[in-house]
Image (spheres, coloured by chain):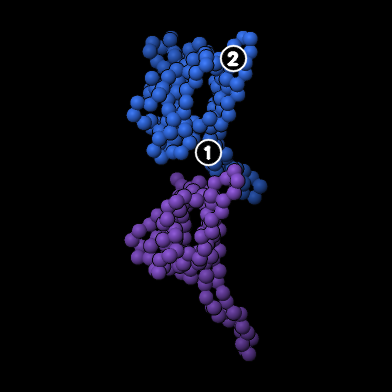
Amino acid sequence: MPEAYAWMEGQLYVYTGNLATSAVVAYAQQCNLSLAWGTVNNETLAGTYYDYSTGKRADLSVGMVMTFDGTLRRLADSATAVHIKFINSSINGTAGYMLYSGRIDTLPIAGADNGVFTQSLTYHCNVWSGF
Amino acid sequence: MSEVRVMMEGTLRFVQQSGSGRTMATAATPVSGLIGYCTDFTFTSAQTITVISDRGRPDHNKQTEVSPIDVSFSLLWTGAHPIPGSGAGASVPMYILEFRANEPENAATVRYFQFFGCPLHSTDFKEAKEGDSIAWKTKALAMSGVNTSGFII
């Protein structure tokens, strides 16, 4: 059985819509990715059950320490889509998800006494692949 | 087999750090020197290892955090002490510290630990009949050693 992946072994990359430019999301502190499949479950008159797809949606949130690199804001302002790659790499292998053609929904910034500025990112898309 | 080292064989040197603090980076002609009358020096390097269990049985280890290195030292105070430096890439003034331990029984062999990115976290001053003393605590971002090469003059 392969080893578990650790947070230290992960990276999160954002890509421009044409996949020409990528950047690692620096100082990430936590993230959550939710992959959801919508279905309607119906029974026919003959007693057979069918699942009908109603769509797929991935929601991602990332918390990070803020820097004044404007890459994320420019990507959020962009009219084109944003792709995100989740990857974990260790000496025992590599695995991850590629999230395609989504949008950055929010980029909240927070600061307080005795702390550094933090920023979070929420993102959604409807197409993904795993590797 | 080498002899056990003792305090008389050790020295502690500093140089003003430049850059981000994670590597041996100094500005041109930084202030450096020997930290004199050192009465103690300690460091603690630690990492967090999480034990992954498989149905209750320990299965493997994962490194989940590398902690900053706690460094502390005390010296008898002469009225002057080194001032940390900052340069391009960092907003907090920092030192690089270098601990040396001579091995007189092994000719010119010297063992070194280098500590990078050391800001002052606390300064404790004490005046006493036996001599005024000052104790510093810092947290290094990174360290290197044991090495056989030193850098700080």
Q: Nearer the viewer, residue B108 or A42?
A: B108
Secondary structure beneath dot 1 equals strand
Disc 2 versus disc 1: distance between alpha carbons? 36 Å
Whole-percent x and y of residue B76? Answer: 55, 15
Q: Which quarter of the figure is the C terminus of chain A placed in? A: bottom left
Whole-percent x and y of residue B89? Answer: 41, 40
Q: Which of B114 and A47 is in front in this view?
A: B114
Taking the spot 42% from the left edge, 52% from the top edge, the residue there is: A69
Three-letter code, disc 2: Asp
Q: Name the residue under label 2.
A: B132
Return the residue found at the far bottom.
A45
Q: Name the residue under label 1.
A: B66
Mark 1 nearby-residue class (10 Å; few <14, some 14–19, many ≥20)? some
- Chain that is coloured blue in the picture: B
Whole-percent x and y of residue B66? Answer: 53, 38
Subunit of label 2? B
What colour denotes chain A? purple
B90 shown above or below A130: above
